[in-house]
Image: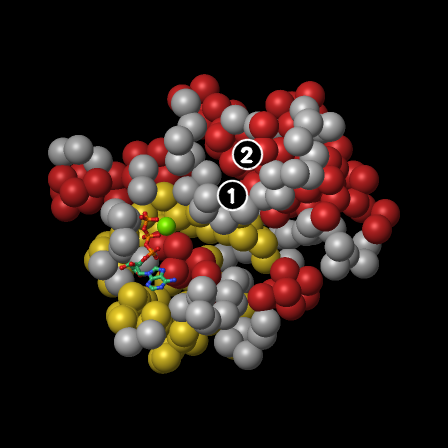
């Protein structure tokens, strides 16, 4: 479904990815794990076609969706036409709008209006805390609830391919459990998921396959079980 090949990206003159390759098949949960500054967010931004200056510039390699390069596409077209959505790091929600307004705003480019109400029900069923707070201003949500809202917004775009930038960040164990339970349920219904995480243990217990990203290069890959058993991965990312 998604094929990234020898991708090299830069911010200005600084090279952040040095030629990474990976794939995501339809229906899979794939994770990219790596430390701070490894290039995880950069990878998602390149796929989501976030343009410079905020986004990275692709200088070599390719990103293909269903066999076609998407390098010429703009960010809004990736969401509207490929149904790929990013739940960003740091959440980027509109604090002065309510939970429900934030969710509704994410549907602006959709043509399938009949399905929007269904998706809103789905978000509220997956995240009951959001349902209880639907008329609350989003800035007053807890960090974890804002994280849920960011994922909910990505769903409301009508996405069938979700890119998640560290959804577990800052979540207490119970909320993290709720988040991954919701994501697993979405995957069971057919959602393809590309998850990036610093928390390798959480990511590998959730994903089918994974890649290790180390300062702009992929240094290991395999099924989640293979990576969890890999001595180098254990030492560097799983605390021995
Ligand atoms: N907008 C930007 N402009 C310049 N350099 C950037 C920009 N965004 C990221 N970088 C640099 O690119 C490298 C990779 O950053 P990236 O945000 O992709 O890391 P990450 O793996 O997501 O880390 P973290 O786990 O801390 O979120 C870092 O060296 C970072 O300083
Ligand atoms: Mg990041």
Dividing the picture into quadrants, the one containing residue 173 is top left
Closest to the observer, 130 or 66:
130
Name the residue carrying label 2. Answer: 146
Q: Position of residue 62 (x, y in %)?
A: 43, 76
Q: Nearer the viewer, residue 21 or 120?
A: 120
Lateral position of residue 220 relative to residue 85, left or right: left
Q: Position of residue 212 (x, y in %)?
A: 27, 52
Q: Position of residue 61 (x, y in %)?
A: 38, 77
Find residue 99 and report its image quarter.
top right
Task: Please name the residue shown 70% across and 34% down the image.
Answer: 98
- The residue carrying pointer 1 sits among few (fewer than 14), some (14 to 19) or many (20 or more) residues within 10 Å by Cα, namely some
Left or right: 12 with respect to 180?
A: left
Q: Which mark is residue 199?
A: none
Q: Can you name the residue that lies furthest to the front here? A: 96
In the rendered image of this protein, does residue 185 appear above or below residue 166? Answer: above
Query: Residue at coordinates 81% horizontally, 58% vertically from top-left?
Result: 111
Which residue corresponds to mark 1?
Answer: 91
Q: Secondary structure at mark 1?
A: loop
Marks 2 and 1 close (CB-CB < 8 Å): yes
Q: Earlier in the sequence, mark 2 or mark 1?
A: 1
In the image, residue 108 sits, relative to residue 74, either above or below, namely above
């Amino acid at each position: 479904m998604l094929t990234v090949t020898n991708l090299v990206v830069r911010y200005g003159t600084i090279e952040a990815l040095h030629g990474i390759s990976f794939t995501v098949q339809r229906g899979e949960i794939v994770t990219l794990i790596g430390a701070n500054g490894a290039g995880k967010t950069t990878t998602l931004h390149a796929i989501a076609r976030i343009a410079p200056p905020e986004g990275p510039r692709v200088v070599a390699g390719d990103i293909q969706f269903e066999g076609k390069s998407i390098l010429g596409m703009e960010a809004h077209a990736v969401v509207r036409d490929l149904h790929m959505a990013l739940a960003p790091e740091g959440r980027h929600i509109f604090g002065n709008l309510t939970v429900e307004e934030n969710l509704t705003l994410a549907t602006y480019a959709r043509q399938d209006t009949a399905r929007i109400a269904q998706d809103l029900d789905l978000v509220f069923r997956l995240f009951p805390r959001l349902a209880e707070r639907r008329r609350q201003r989003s800035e007053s949500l807890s960090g974890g609830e804002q994280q849920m809202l960011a994922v909910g917004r990505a769903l409301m775009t009508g996405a069938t391919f979700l890119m998640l930038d560290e959804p577990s960040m800052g979540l207490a164990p119970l909320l993290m459990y709720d988040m991954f339970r919701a994501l697993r349920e979405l995957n069971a219904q057919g959602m393809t998921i590309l998850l990036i995480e610093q928390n390798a243990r959480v990511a590998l217990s959730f994903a089918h396959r994974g890649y290790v990203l180390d300062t702009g290069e992929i240094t290991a890959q395999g099924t989640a079980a293979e990576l969890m058993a890999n001595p180098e991965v254990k030492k560097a990312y799983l605390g021995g």
